[in-house]
């Protein structure tokens, strides 16, 4: 039985129990708490073997509009030569090629205003921590992901550069 087909299953991930949501988007309700929103987002990411553009359609309301559009563009790039420089060779949400052993939200590091938040997520790769800063903006009552920043990767910058490249090529 495939993991992503089991609804309501709970996986224990490194000091944290994360609900797995299967094939439905877990973000019909955007939470007032950005930590809870990011925890559910990564619970969903962990429930997928591979995230493709069909999966991304489920997440359209989870991202700031331009970031989402450019993320989809970058995910669609496949080819050789110069265009290959803009192709993803890692998971954009984990900023790694490997799957971590688990993750946890570092709630004591979260910063929040009325319209922005930064939630820090720690991933464990063979007991070595790697921290991402998930930037969010509030639009209406909903938190939306506007960037994911790691030690070496600024995802918004990468997807914006890919979109600009594609715009210039056409």
Image (spheres, grey):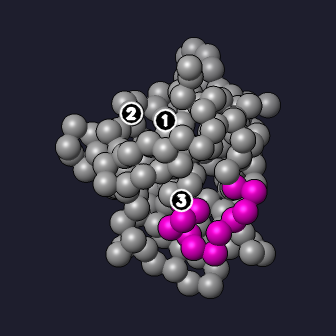
| Residue at 43% in and 74% down | 110
| Residue at 57% in and 14% down | 80
Q: Do tag 2 and tag 1 residues touch (Cβ < 8 Å)?
A: yes
Q: Provide residue 52's location: percent of width, then percent of height.
A: 65, 29
Q: Quadrant of residue 87?
A: top right
Label whose residue precedes the other's in the sequence (2 or 1): 1
Q: Provide residue 126's location: percent of width, then percent of height.
A: 22, 37
Label whose residue precedes the other's in the sequence (3 or 2): 3
How many angstroms separate mark 2 from mark 1 (CA)?
9 Å
Dot 1 falls on a residue whose secondary structure is loop
Q: Which residue is denoted by mark 1 in the rendering?
A: 91
Dot 2 falls on a residue whose secondary structure is loop
- Front residue of 52/127: it is 127
Which stretch is magenta? 27-38
128 left or right of 13 in image: left
Tell me the crowding category of disc 1: few under 14, some 14 to 19, or many 20 or more residues within 10 angstroms, Cα based. Answer: some
Q: Quadrant of residue 158?
A: top right
Dot 3 falls on a residue whose secondary structure is helix
105 left or right of 43 in image: left
| Residue at 47% in and 28% down | 89
Q: Provide residue 43's location: percent of width, then percent of height.
A: 52, 47
128 left or right of 151 in image: left
Q: Provide residue 46's location: percent of width, then percent of height.
A: 49, 39
| Residue at 67% in and 51% down | 26
Label whose residue precedes the other's in the sequence (3 or 1): 3
How many angstroms separate mark 3 from mark 1 (CA)?
16 Å
- Give the number of the mark in front: 2 or 1: 2
Q: Which residue is denoted by mark 2 in the rendering?
A: 99
């Amino acid at each position: 039985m495939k993991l992503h087909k089991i609804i309501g299953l709970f996986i224990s991930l490194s000091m944290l129990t994360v609900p797995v949501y299967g094939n439905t988007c877990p973000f019909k309700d955007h939470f007032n708490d950005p930590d809870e929103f990011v925890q559910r987002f990564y619970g969903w990411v962990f429930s997928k073997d591979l995230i493709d553009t069909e999966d991304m359609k489920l997440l359209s309301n989870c991202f700031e509009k331009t970031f989402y559009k450019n993320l989809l563009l970058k995910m669609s790039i496949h080819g050789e030569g110069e265009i290959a420089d803009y192709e993803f060779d890692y998971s954009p949400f984990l900023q790694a090629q490997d799957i971590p052993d688990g993750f946890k939200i570092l709630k004591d590091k979260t910063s929040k205003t009325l319209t922005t938040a930064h939630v820090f997520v720690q991933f464990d790769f063979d007991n070595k921590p790697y921290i991402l800063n998930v930037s969010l903006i509030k639009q209406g009552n909903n938190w939306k992901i506007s960037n994911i920043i790691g030690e070496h990767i600024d995802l918004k910058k990468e997807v914006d550069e890919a979109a600009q490249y594609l715009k210039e090529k056409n």
